[in-house]
Structure formats: structure tokens, C-alpha cells
Image: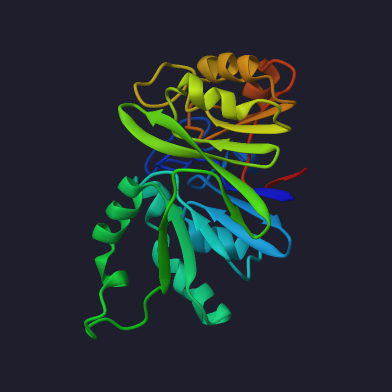
């Protein structure tokens, strides 16, 4: 199984529009962050986690030619507003793309993008999608997908465990029952917005505490803001922890 971090940035992306800080103006390519999204490739299938606002750019940058399923963590704009780009994959694949999420997320997507799911003849070229509610482990192309209940502030959202990897982004609290689902990981990809505490995201320090408690072999921090310089922050992290960067590939 290969994991590609398509985007590791927070909702604004990095650089932030109009910002002249040292990180937004940095020449280090690893400080250029599109909105957070992940690709899991296994058994000749591509599973996308979230259709980020930057999906078109990400697909072109990483030569993605098929998307066989989408897992949604939650319905915030930076995680779903690239949904219309899925129509290009429909053109290639000639079939609907299954999309999985919680009842809250799926209902919000169907409401916000009702043109996709309304057959009234008034719209032209649009994505062809099938939505499925998930609340328990399920098989997807021979992979066991475990939804993990987490909290984004007060909002209940999903993380996902697939085999020895887990993707937990936009998170500020992991309930004890969910922590039990995250034992024995090869890799934990965990959201960490900045050093300063935030009401709906783990800080770097909080993510380190969570990672140390769960004890995966490797922790990669994602959903990064423009307060985090890649090189300087990486040097400050404990052994086994590192920052993500766009295009990072992990094979397990």
C-alpha cells in the first residue's frame, strides 16, 4: 500500500493570500502547502480521502488518472470543495464513483452540492457519484477501512484507519474508545496546525503527546499552517515525528 500526501496545508493553504511572512515567502518547496488530502493506492485502486479545494492541481501534479472511491472526513470547505473535479475521472472511468462518510457529512455534501444529485435536466456536465453512510469497518477493494470517531472542536467527524496506517486530521480530541482502534500502527498521519493552542485543532505539542501515547512506529504531522517552517520545525520534533510535505510518499 502506498500513501501519497497530496496536500498538507490548512484551510488557507500556504502561502496565505496577501501574507508576506517568512514562511509564505519562503523558497523552500516544502513550505508550499495545498489543502489537505490523501491518496491511498493498493490493489490497483486509488482511494482518495477528501476532495480538497486544490484537487485539480493535486491530480495534475501527481499524475492521478483514476479515483476509485472517496472517503470523507467532514464537510468543511477545504475538504470538500474540489468535489466537482471528480467529473473528469468519471469521463475516464465511465462509471459512478462511490463516496463514503458519516450521515452528517454525506447529508451536508448532498445539500451543498445538490446539483450533483438532482436529475432535473437543467445541469450539464457534472460528477456522477454514489454516496454511502459508514459507521463501522467495511471492505473496500480488499482493504479493511475502519472509521474512527474523533472531534473537530465540538463537531464529531471521522478519521480512518486502513491496515497499518491511520489518517486523523482536523482533530482536537480523540475519545478513549477511538484510541483503542489506533494501536499497533505503522504510521499515524495526524493534524497539527501550529505551536499556539487552537480550539478545533491539535497544536504541535498536543499532537506530540497524542502520538507518544498511541506509540505508532512513525508519526507524520499534517494540516499545517503558515506558522510552521518545514526545516526548523522538523529539527525541533522528537525522534519518530516529522512534518508532512506535499507529494510525500509512504509505503507500508
> In this view of the protein, which residue sits in the foreground, 21 or 218?
218
Please determine whether, in this image, residue 212 is positioned above or below residue 63: above
Q: Position of residue 30 (x, y in %)?
A: 63, 40
Q: Position of residue 29 (x, y in %)?
A: 64, 43
Residue 184 visible, this angle: yes
Which residue is drawn at the image coordinates 34% and 26% (left, top)?
A: 153
Is residue 210 rendered to the left or right of residue 242?
A: left
> In this view of the protein, which residue sits in the foreground, 213 or 61?
213
How many badges with numbers are in the image?
0
Which residue is drawn at the image coordinates 48% and 32% (left, top)?
A: 226
Please determine whether, in this image, residue 65 is positioned above or below residue 241: below
Which residue is drawn at the image coordinates 27% and 81% (left, top)?
A: 123
Which residue is drawn at the image coordinates 45% and 22% (left, top)?
A: 175
Q: Position of residue 217 (x, y in %)?
A: 75, 26
Residue extending farthest right: 252
Residue 28 visible, this angle: no
Q: Position of residue 51 (x, y in %)?
A: 46, 56
> In this view of the protein, which residue sits in the foreground, 84 or 114?
114
Please determine whether, in this image, residue 187 is positioned above or below residue 29: above
Is residue 108 rendered to the left or right of residue 13?
A: left
Q: In which quarter of the image is the C terminus?
A: top right
Amino acid at each position: 500500500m502506498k500513501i501519497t500526501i497530496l496536500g498538507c496545508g490548512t484551510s488557507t493553504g500556504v502561502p496565505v493570500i496577501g501574507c508576506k511572512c517568512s514562511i509564505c515567502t519562503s523558497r523552500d518547496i516544502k513550505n508550499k502547502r495545498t489543502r489537505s488530502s490523501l491518496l491511498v493506492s493498493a490493489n490497483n485502486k486509488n482511494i482518495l480521502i477528501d476532495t480538497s479545494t486544490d484537487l485539480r492541481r493535486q491530480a495534475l501534479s501527481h499524475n492521478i488518472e483514476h479515483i476509485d472511491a472517496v472517503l470523507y472526513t467532514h464537510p468543511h470547505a477545504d475538504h470538500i470543495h474540489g468535489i466537482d473535479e471528480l467529473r473528469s475521472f468519471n469521463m475516464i472511468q465511465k462509471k459512478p464513483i462511490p463516496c463514503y462518510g458519516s450521515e452528517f457529512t454525506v447529508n451536508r455534501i448532498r445539500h451543498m452540492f445538490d446539483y450533483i444529485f438532482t436529475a432535473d435536466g437543467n445541469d450539464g456536465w457534472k460528477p456522477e457519484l454514489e454516496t454511502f453512510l459508514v459507521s463501522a469497518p467495511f471492505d473496500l477493494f480488499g482493504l479493511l477501512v475502519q472509521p474512527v470517531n474523533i472531534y473537530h472542536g465540538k463537531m464529531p467527524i471521522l478519521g480512518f484507519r486502513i491496515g497499518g496506517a491511520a489518517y486523523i486530521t482536523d482533530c482536537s480530541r480523540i475519545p478513549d474508545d477511538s484510541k483503542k482502534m489506533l494501536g499497533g500502527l505503522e504510521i499515524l498521519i495526524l493534524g497539527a496546525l501550529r505551536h499556539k493552542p487552537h480550539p478545533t485543532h491539535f497544536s504541535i505539542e498536543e499532537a506530540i503527546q497524542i502520538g507518544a501515547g498511541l506509540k505508532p512506529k512513525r508519526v507524520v504531522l499534517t494540516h499545517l499552517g503558515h506558522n510552521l517552517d518545514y526545516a526548523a520545525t522538523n529539527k525541533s520534533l522528537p525522534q519518530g515525528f516529522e512534518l508532512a510535505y506535499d507529494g510525500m510518499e509512504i509505503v507500508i
